[in-house]
Structures are given as structure tokens and as C-alpha cells.
């Protein structure tokens, strides 16, 4: 699905925005807009910029899946280094120590990123950029407060390098791009479409306004009007050389001198580092519209200088406002930084602890964290259950061995049965059987008669001369016993009954049934005896 990428150039006097719609393999220009900051308002620049951003993103709800914002170049330090190796890990370990003596701040106070510009047999050339953490934090807070959380934060000179495919060049001709802004000027050097160098100065069009104001003794607003509407760096000369246009031109030239010094030194440094000459400069930025500026720079720097024209996928789009190129250049470069394969470098000051995390990525990250935590918990539970199972298995095995040993000790004949559950089951059956047999000989209560006592008393009740054959001796209730027996006569059965009642152990004795046997030789009877005490 196509995404809208917004390049947000947050300048000293205006916010410029370029929108590009990008898909996986292509992108196209959507629109460019410029939004001036409130003038004649005595508020800090951050508050003015924040109010305009609030209107654009929070109030108007401008669609933006990815935002690339600028950080004023005056807040960013650049260093060009050469290291005798090209291994990325060694570079990341060594670079902070190399920079420690080159920047005034402590390394703990800055955010650092770098780009390997080239590698050869002698090592690598590296461009390092850094800014103070407190400045980056304040800048991000301003953007987030307005609803514009940027994916990347770049100085203008990094954004300008992304215009490499928008500029018509002959072959691999080196060139420089100069963005002449209100409060700062940025330089980017390209060779063969590759990013070679970049830096910014805290000098811009406001420097020229102050030069006119001081030289002509006019208010700032009047000096700005003269610079933008009347000034020309090559005015018509007069014999005396003191005409008003000449005064203005001379004041502007004096104001441009620090910028020329910085450009000469930077171009000389690039020539020494890369062994190349920069034959051509392209100029952009709102202040680049100063009449005669390109000719004056060409004269002073002794190279070809021309206004920047964009003619690539963005500048060549029918709806791109070519007349706005000087102002749009940085915002176009910022937007291209967020497009796949369009960026000239991977530099981004939102790195380390400040790395951008979108809401979707944050949710995904939280979901992954929750999933990982859930996985760990499940794993711990599985380990716990596994350990419990293992320990209980060991305990069961020990108990099983102990039970087998006890079973063999009690019942040696069980050795022929398989050890384990079968032997345990056989032992349990034997124990139950012996328990039943033992119950006949022991009372269930301390003062109660046992079944054996009842049987003994019945035996005593049988006269010695009486023959008796007990067929059944059963406890039908806790205090009743049924006896089925065969004796020689009815009198013998009655005598046994009377003897039982005399013993004192029985409360009553009834002969429920008595009859002769088939051959009339004996009497079969059934007697129910009620005990004086319950057996259990």
C-alpha cells in the first residue's frame, strides 16, 4: 500500500513541506507548500514553529505515514575522518575515541551518527555528524507536541545530498549544492552521485540584512525590503562610485565575505581529502534569489555557479512548482530520504535511545514482548510439570520397590508374580483375606465379645454326649447370630438353647425351624441368638 512521505524543512522564517507518495518500487510527487512563521511576534522560534506545525498536523490532519524533519545545521557538528580499516564493528568502537578530542562536548552529551563515504586498501573515509542530546530532545518534543513524530531527523546538508538524481550532470562530474537560508548556509558535495562532504555555517540572509541596516542606518524591515527588491551585487557603476545601489552592493559584499571564506576553506578541504576539484556549484534557498549572487560567487570562487534546477522524478513532475525550487530544495531532499533507494546516505540523528518507533511497531513490539513472556511462562510451567512428573515417577518407583520388598517378605510365594502393579494387587488381596480372618478373633470394641467368643460359648453349650454338625454360623446383625446345625434329637436342640441362655452372653435364643432329616436319623434346626452386647 502506498505511503505518504513528508519532508519537513523547519526554517527560521517558514516551514516548507514536500509530500511524496511512495510504494515498493516507485514514487511520485504530490505537492509542496510553504507556511510562514508569524512575524512581528515576540516569541521564541520554537514556539512559533510549534504553533504552525500544530495547525498543519493536529488541526488540518495532514496525512503522513513517514515524516523526515530537518534539524538546524547550526546545531550539528561535522567531522571528516580517515581510519586505517573498514570493518564496521571496529569503526563503531574506534570512532567515539577519535572524535573525543575534536568536539567541545563530552561524548555522553551528544548523539552521534556516521556514514562510510568510501573504502580502499588504505582504510575508510568517514563523515561523522553529532548534536547535543538536549537540543535533539527539545526539537523532538516540539515536533511530537504538534503531532509530527519524525522517522528521521537530518541537518540540511544531508537532505541536499538526496537531490543527486534531480540534478542534470555530465557523467560523474563533481558538484556542490549551497543552500543559502535565512540564518544558516549549508554545503553538500557530490561526486558521481555519491555523498562526499557536508557542513553548515551560522551565516545566512539575516547577516546581509544586518549589514545593510548598519551601513545605511535603516530599520531592519527597510533593510530586508532593499535586499529582496532593489539590491543587485553588480549595479550600474557611477564615476564617483557612491550611488545608492553601489552602497547597497558594497554592504552586501562585505556581509558575504565570511560566507565566501567558509566556502573556500570547505572546498579546499574536500579537494585535499578526495583529490578532486569542484568545478560547479548549484545555489538554492530563499536568499539565493539575491540578484547577481551566482555571478558574484562564480567570480570570487573561480568556478561555475548557477541556480539549482530540479528535473528528476520530483522536479520533472508536471505539478512541481519550478519557481519554488530555491525554497523547496531542502524539503524535497528530506522527503526523498524516506523513500526506498532514494537516499544518498543512511545518516539519521534519531539513533540509539532516540530511534523512532511507530505506534504500529510499538504495538508489535509489545505483542512480541508479551508473546515472548507468555512463551517463557509456558516453558517454565512445562519445566515445572516435567520436574514434578520426574520426581513423582522416582518416588513412585521407590515406593513400588519398597512395596515389592514388603510383599515378598510377607508372602514369599508371590515371587512368581510379576513385580509392580500385579504383585501389589495380589498382596492387597491376601491382606484383605487375612484381615477378614483376623476380624473373627478380635473384637472391634474393647468391651464387646468377638465372633470367636460367641463360637466358644456355643461350643460350651453343647452337652458332651450330644453330637452336633454346624452347617452355618453367621452374624446377621451386630447383635444377632444365626446358627444352622444338625443334631441327634429335638431335645438336644432344646438343651443347647437352654445352655446358651444360661451363659449370660445371650439375651434370647429362638429355634425358628426344626425338622427331621430324610432318613429320620437326625434333626436339622435353625436357631437365632440375640447377644446381650453388640459385636460391633
Image (spheres, rainbow, N blue to C red):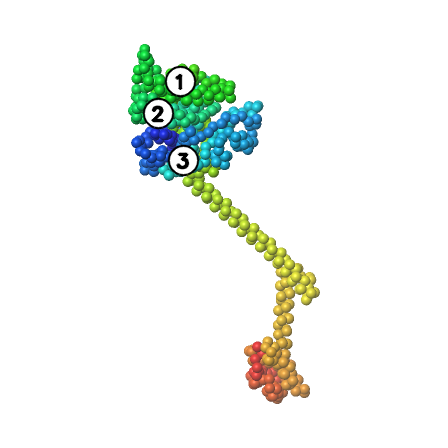
Label 3 secondary element:
helix
Report the residue at 34% width, 18% height from top. 249
Discs 2, 1 touching: Cβ within 8 Å: no
Mark 1 lies on a secondary structure that is helix
Q: Earlier in the sequence, mark 2 or mark 1?
A: 2
Toward the viewer: 352 or 395? 352
Whether pointer 1 and pointer 3 mark residues with C-beta atoms closer than 8 Å, the reply is no
Q: Earlier in the sequence, mark 2 or mark 3?
A: 3
Which residue in the protein does label 2 denote? Answer: 210
Side of 55 relative to 339 (left or right): left
Q: Quadrant of the N terminus?
A: top left
Q: Position of residue 360 (x, y in %)?
A: 42, 40
Q: Characterize the local packing of mark 1: few (<14), some (14-19) or many (20 or more) Cα atoms within 10 angstroms.
A: some
In front of the other: 490 or 29: 29
Q: CA distance from mark 2 to mark 3?
A: 27 Å
Check disc 1 and report the residue beneath it.
297
Distance between the Cα atoms at labels 2 and 1? Answer: 20 Å
Element carrying mark 2 = helix
Q: 10 Å neighbourhood of mark 3: few (<14), some, or many (≥20)?
A: some
Viewer-closest of 257 and 346 = 257
Q: Alpha carbon of mark 1 to alpha carbon of mark 3: how far? A: 33 Å
What is the number of the mark on residue 380?
none
The image's mark for residue 139 is 3
Amino acid at each position: 500500500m502506498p505511503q505518504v512521505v513528508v519532508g519537513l524543512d523547519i526554517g527560521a522564517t517558514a516551514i516548507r513541506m514536500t509530500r511524496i507518495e511512495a510504494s515498493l518500487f516507485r514514487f511520485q510527487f504530490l505537492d509542496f507548500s510553504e507556511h510562514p512563521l508569524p512575524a512581528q511576534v515576540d516569541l521564541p522560534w520554537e514556539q512559533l514553529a510549534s504553533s504552525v506545525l500544530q495547525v498543519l498536523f493536529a488541526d488540518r490532519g495532514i496525512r503522513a505515514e513517514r515524516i523526515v524533519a530537518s534539524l538546524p545545521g547550526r546545531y550539528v557538528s561535522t567531522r571528516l575522518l580517515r581510519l586505517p580499516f573498514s570493518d564496521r564493528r571496529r569503526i563503531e568502537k574506534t570512532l567515539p575515541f577519535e572524535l573525543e578530542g575534536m568536539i567541545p562536548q563530552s561524548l555522553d552529551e551528544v548523539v552521534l551518527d556516521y556514514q562510510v563515504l568510501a573504502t580502499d586498501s588504505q582504510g575508510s573515509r568517514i563523515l561523522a555528524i553529532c548534536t547535543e542530546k538536549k537540543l535533539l530532545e527539545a526539537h523532538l518534543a516540539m515536533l511530537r507536541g504538534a503531532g509530527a513524530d519524525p522517522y528521521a531527523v537530518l541537518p540540511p546538508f544531508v537532505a541536499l545530498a538526496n537531490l543527486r538524481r534531480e540534478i542534470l550532470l555530465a557523467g560523474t562530474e563533481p558538484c556542490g549544492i549551497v543552500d543559502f537560508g535565512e540564518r544558516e548556509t549549508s554545503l553538500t558535495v557530490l561526486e558521481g552521485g555519491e555523498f562526499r562532504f557536508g557542513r553548515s555555517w551560522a551565516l545566512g540572509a539575516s547577516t546581509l540584512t544586518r549589514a545593510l541596516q548598519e551601513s545605511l542606518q535603516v530599520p531592519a524591515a527597510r533593510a530586508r525590503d532593499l535586499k529582496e527588491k532593489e539590491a543587485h551585487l553588480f549595479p550600474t557603476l557611477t564615476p564617483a562610485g557612491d550611488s545608492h545601489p553601489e552602497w547597497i552592493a558594497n554592504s552586501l559584499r562585505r556581509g558575504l565575505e565570511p560566507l565566501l571564506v567558509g566556502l573556500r576553506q570547505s572546498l579546499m578541504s574536500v579537494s585535499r581529502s578526495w583529490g578532486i576539484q569542484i568545478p560547479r556549484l548549484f545555489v538554492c534557498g530563499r536568499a539565493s534569489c539575491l540578484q547577481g549572487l551566482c555571478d558574484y560567487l562564480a567570480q570570487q570562487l573561480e568556478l561555475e555557479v548557477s541556480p539549482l534546477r530540479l528535473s528528476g522524478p520530483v522536479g520533472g513532475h508536471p505539478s512541481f512548482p519550478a519557481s519554488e525550487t530555491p525554497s523547496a530544495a531542502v524539503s524535497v531532499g528530506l522527503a526523498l530520504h524516506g523513500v526506498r533507494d532514494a537516499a544518498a546516505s543512511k545518516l539519521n540523528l534519531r539513533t540509539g535511545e532516540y530511534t523512532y518507533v511507530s505506534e504500529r511497531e510499538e504495538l508489535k513490539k509489545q505483542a512480541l514482548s508479551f508473546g515472548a513472556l507468555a512463551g517463557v511462562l509456558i516453558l517454565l510451567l512445562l519445566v515445572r510439570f516435567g520436574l514434578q512428573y520426574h520426581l513423582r515417577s522416582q518416588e513412585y518407583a521407590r515406593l513400588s520397590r519398597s512395596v515389592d520388598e514388603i510383599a515378598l517378605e510377607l508372602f514369599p510365594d508371590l515371587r512368581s508374580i510379576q513385580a509392580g502393579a500385579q504383585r501389589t494387587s495380589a498382596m492387597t488381596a491376601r491382606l484383605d483375606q487375612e484381615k477378614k480372618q483376623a476380624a473373627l478373633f478380635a473384637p472391634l470394641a474393647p468391651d464387646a465379645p468377638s465372633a470367636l467368643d460367641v463360637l466358644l460359648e456355643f461350643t460350651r453349650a453343647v452337652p458332651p454326649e450330644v453330637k452336633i454338625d454346624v452347617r452355618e454360623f453367621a452374624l446377621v446383625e451386630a447383635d444377632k447370630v444365626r446358627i444352622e446345625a444338625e443334631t441327634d434329637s429335638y431335645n438336644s436342640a432344646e438343651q443347647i438353647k437352654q445352655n446358651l441362655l444360661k451363659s449370660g452372653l445371650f439375651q434370647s435364643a429362638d429355634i425358628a425351624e426344626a425338622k427331621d432329616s430324610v432318613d429320620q436319623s437326625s434333626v436339622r434346626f435353625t436357631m437365632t441368638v440375640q447377644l446381650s452386647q453388640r459385636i460391633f
